[in-house]
């Protein structure tokens, strides 16, 4: 609130020139009248009562500092602040460190220090984003270092190895199974510090997300023995929603609480409204220091921002109308978003213009995703999938390597590393190096647990699509788990596996829309299995639809059969059946002008067996009755099997007698034999048939034939 001291500062700093001008006004006024401007009224003639009333009103108004400062801001306007005038005010998701003052926690520090004194086991708990790590690192740690030798340890999937490395002060490559209480106690005995040792387990909830229950209990037994058998104290820093797991783990190891005294704890709470406003003003102090008008603007901004950040208790068991609070990390993130736009945006008007907390959070996700997309070329949806892979199923952060993220997202390792490094440049991701056997491994984690909440709640459209896809995938996972279960207990595995290949519980449109969001191996197998089942069923439907059409079409275009054609000049009856028409599968007279192929042994029967005759209106036979009009031909397919011929060549056909008379030395074929295969160009010169000789005598020949009405399709 503005005070009288602020008012005096405003008058001294901003109103001094104006007051000087107003003080000189009466003298200037009378001087002008004496110089000839007698039409100006004399100040001495003004009613004394009116002057007294004006002075009284002014005196009454300026007694209220808020009104006075508002008038000052209205008349004189707002003085712009250059970026170079002030240091960085907000931290975003980064915790305060040991050499940085933590605003708003002096009272909590005093109470916690009092509770902690003389306690070998102590728990500090609070909800995600309330500032536990900042409280320990910035406020508590400097005091503890005066009395203890402090060892800071982060638990992970190998907690004992992490503890052993933290005690030694270096990364150790050893088998965790070989680590025992005796070994660690022996190491502590050799490395006895000048002051009692204190181990701080920050973010202890990670042990429940990364370590199996057997390993957790073994690790906690080792910690129990360290406290009991050595001069060692332990502080556990954990989230409130994991406190019940910490208590259960401690009771499982030390049910009598001889070492793990669960009554020793301290709770870090989020800020109430008034305290949040005071803390925010303390953060903004470099902006208004020594200027009451700017302080008034800062107060207005702090009230507007805190009103946006107030939220009801997250515990569903509490009444929503309970006192609302503000998370420090959320205040830091929103403040940083405004500050990065310029210090002039740290005002109530700018906050409202940007859409308040909702608009800023949406911009927070969008700007970070756009930055990563522009820097890496990876699509925004895949960028969000990568960073969301760092969120556990309990909406907490977790540490993953690039290969572990690849198992979840199925993206290229190179793209994953580039995306995570780009998010690290925006202070959303922390990059650390851990020892894995004999090699160093780079792992990534979110800068703060609250970022997991932001990724779940921020109303960014792209992120909303990802969340919606994840919800739909979760539904289909549960639905298909039932659908893929065998209907009968005694059903064979083979039959059930075959049936599963054709099961498609997810609609094809849903599969296509969800496929790009299927990050885990289980989800990808689920979607790909449904797509495969759809493909199999579609193939069966297409085959069932196409095959009848194919065979019907084939029956209309392909004809086949068997024919016995007699020698045309043996008898008069044989003459009438010596020609063959493939398109109608009928035998016609030699001179019918319809035959595609005729058979004869000449009028004097001089050849040992009959020969073929292909009518064509050329050469010696041009103009004959059987040749008008005709363009038939015969092609001997040497060394060819009948069924091997899929289509007939377009060139090389011989007209008239085959074998020719007189013989052609190049043909090397003087008589027709059983098994000979021929391609026949029909009378029209455009369509073809094939035949194989199955029997031959002096006055007749038998053959099997296939005819294709559409030559380009071949004999299929």
Image (tube, rainbow, N blue to C red):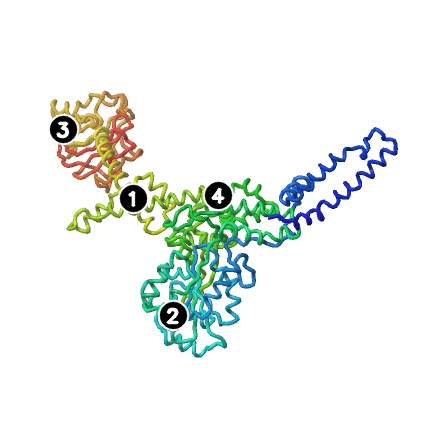
Foreground: disc 4 or disc 3: 4
Closer mark to the observer between disc 2 and disc 1: 2
Camera-nearest label, 1 or 3: 1
Q: Nearer the viewer, residue 41 or 517?
A: 41
Task: Quickly name the residue at label 3.
Answer: 566
Mark in the foreground, 1 or 4: 4
46 with respect to 228 (left or right): right
The kind of secondary structure element at disc 4 is helix
Residue marked by disc 2: 223
Q: On the rendered structure, is 553 left or right of 152? A: left
Q: Earlier in the sequence, mark 4 or mark 3?
A: 4
Alpha carbon separation for disc pair 1 and 4: 38 Å
Disc assigned to residue 36:
none
4 and 2 marks in contact (CB < 8 Å): no
**Badge 1 or badge 3: first in the primary sequence:** 1
Q: Secondary structure at mark 3?
A: strand
Q: Are marks 2 and 3 in contact (CB under 8 Å)?
A: no
**Residue 62 picture location, percent across and down:** 67, 43
Q: Is residue 3 above or below residue 554?
A: below
Instruction: Where is residue 477? Give x, y as percent.
Output: 30, 47
- Residue 68 seen in the figure: yes
Q: Which residue is mark 4?
A: 358
Measured as percent of width and height from the top left, residue 631 is found at 28, 26
In space, the residues marked 2 and 3 are separated at their CA atoms by 108 Å
Label 4 or label 2, whichever comes before in sequence order: 2
Q: Which residue is mark 1?
A: 530
Q: Which quadrant of the view contains residue 594?
A: top left
């Amino acid at each position: 609130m503005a005070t009288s001291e602020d008012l005096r500062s405003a008058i001294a700093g901003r109103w001094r020139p104006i007051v000087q001008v107003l003080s000189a006004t009466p003298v200037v006024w009378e001087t002008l009248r004496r110089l000839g401007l007698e039409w100006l009224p004399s100040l001495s003639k003004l009613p004394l009562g009116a002057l007294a009333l004006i002075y009284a009103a002014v005196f009454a108004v300026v007694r209220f500092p808020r009104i006075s400062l508002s008038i000052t801001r209205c008349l004189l306007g707002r003085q712009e602040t250059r970026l170079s005038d002030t240091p960085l005010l907000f931290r975003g998701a980064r915790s305060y460190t040991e050499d940085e003052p933590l605003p708003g926690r002096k009272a909590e520090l005093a109470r916690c220090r009092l509770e902690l004194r003389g306690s070998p086991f102590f728990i500090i708990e609070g909800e995600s984003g309330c500032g536990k790590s900042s409280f320990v690192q910035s406020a508590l740690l400097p005091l503890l270092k005066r009395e203890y030798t402090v060892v800071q340890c982060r638990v992970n999937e190998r907690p004992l190895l992490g503890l052993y490395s933290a005690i030694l002060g270096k990364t150790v490559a050893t088998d965790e199974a070989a680590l025992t209480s005796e070994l660690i106690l022996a190491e502590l005995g050799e490395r006895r510090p000048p002051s009692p040792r204190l181990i701080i387990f920050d973010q202890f909830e990670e042990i429940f997300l990364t370590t199996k229950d057997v390993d957790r209990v073994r690790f906690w037994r080792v910690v129990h023995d360290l406290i009991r058998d050595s001069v060692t104290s332990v502080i556990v820093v954990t989230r409130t929603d994991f406190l019940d797991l910490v208590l259960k783990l401690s009771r499982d190891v030390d049910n009598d609480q001889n070492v793990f005294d669960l009554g020793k704890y301290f709770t870090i709470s989020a800020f109430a409204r008034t305290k949040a406003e005071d803390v925010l003003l303390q953060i903004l102090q470099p902006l208004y220091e020594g200027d009451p008008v700017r302080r008034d603007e800062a107060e207005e901004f702090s009230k507007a921002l805190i009103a946006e950040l107030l939220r009801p208790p997250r515990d569903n068991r509490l009444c929503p109308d309970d006192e609302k609070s503000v998370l420090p990390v959320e205040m830091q993130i929103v403040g940083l978003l405004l500050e990065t736009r310029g210090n002039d945006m740290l005002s109530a008007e700018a906050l409202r213009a940007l859409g308040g907390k909702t608009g800023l959070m949406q911009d927070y996700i969008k700007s970070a995703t756009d930055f990563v997309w522009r820097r890496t070329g990876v699509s925004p949806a895949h960028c969000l999938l990568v960073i969301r892979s760092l969120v556990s199923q309990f909406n907490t952060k977790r540490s993953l390597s690039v290969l572990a993220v690849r198992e979840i997202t199925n993206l290229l390792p190179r793209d994953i590393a580039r995306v995570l490094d780009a998010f690290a440049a925006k202070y959303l991701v922390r990059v650390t190096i851990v020892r894995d056997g004999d090699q160093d491994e780079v792992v990534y984690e979110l800068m703060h647990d609250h970022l997991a909440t932001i990724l779940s709640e921020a109303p960014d459209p792209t992120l909303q699509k990802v969340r919606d896809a994840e919800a739909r995938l979760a539904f289909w996972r549960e639905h298909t788990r039932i659908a893929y279960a065998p209907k009968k207990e005694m059903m064979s595995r083979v039959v059930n596996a075959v049936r599963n290949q054709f099961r498609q519980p997810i609609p094809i449109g849903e599969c296509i829309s969800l496929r790009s969001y299927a990050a885990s191996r289980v989800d990808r197998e689920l979607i790909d299995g449904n797509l495969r089942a759809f493909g199999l069923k579609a193939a069966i439907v297409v085959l069932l639809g196409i095959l009848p059409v194919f065979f019907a079409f084939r029956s209309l275009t392909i004809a086949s059969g068997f024919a016995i054609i007699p020698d045309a000049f043996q008898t008069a009856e044989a003459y009438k059946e010596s020609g063959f028409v493939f398109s109608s599968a009928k035998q016609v007279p030699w001179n019918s002008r319809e035959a595609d192929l005729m058979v004869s042994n000449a009028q004097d029967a001089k050849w040992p067996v009959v020969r073929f005759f292909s009518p064509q209106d050329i050469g010696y036979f041009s103009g004959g009755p059987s040749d008008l009009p005709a363009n038939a031909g015969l092609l001997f397919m040497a060394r060819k099997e009948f069924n091997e011929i899929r289509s007939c060549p377009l060139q090389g056909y011989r007209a008239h007698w085959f074998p020719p008379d007189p013989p052609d030395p190049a043909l090397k074929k003087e008589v027709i034999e059983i098994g000979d295969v021929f391609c026949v160009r029909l009378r029209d010169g455009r369509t073809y048939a094939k035949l194989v000789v199955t029997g031959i005598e002096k006055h007749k020949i038998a053959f099997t034939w296939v005819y294709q009405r559409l030559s380009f399709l071949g004999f299929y």
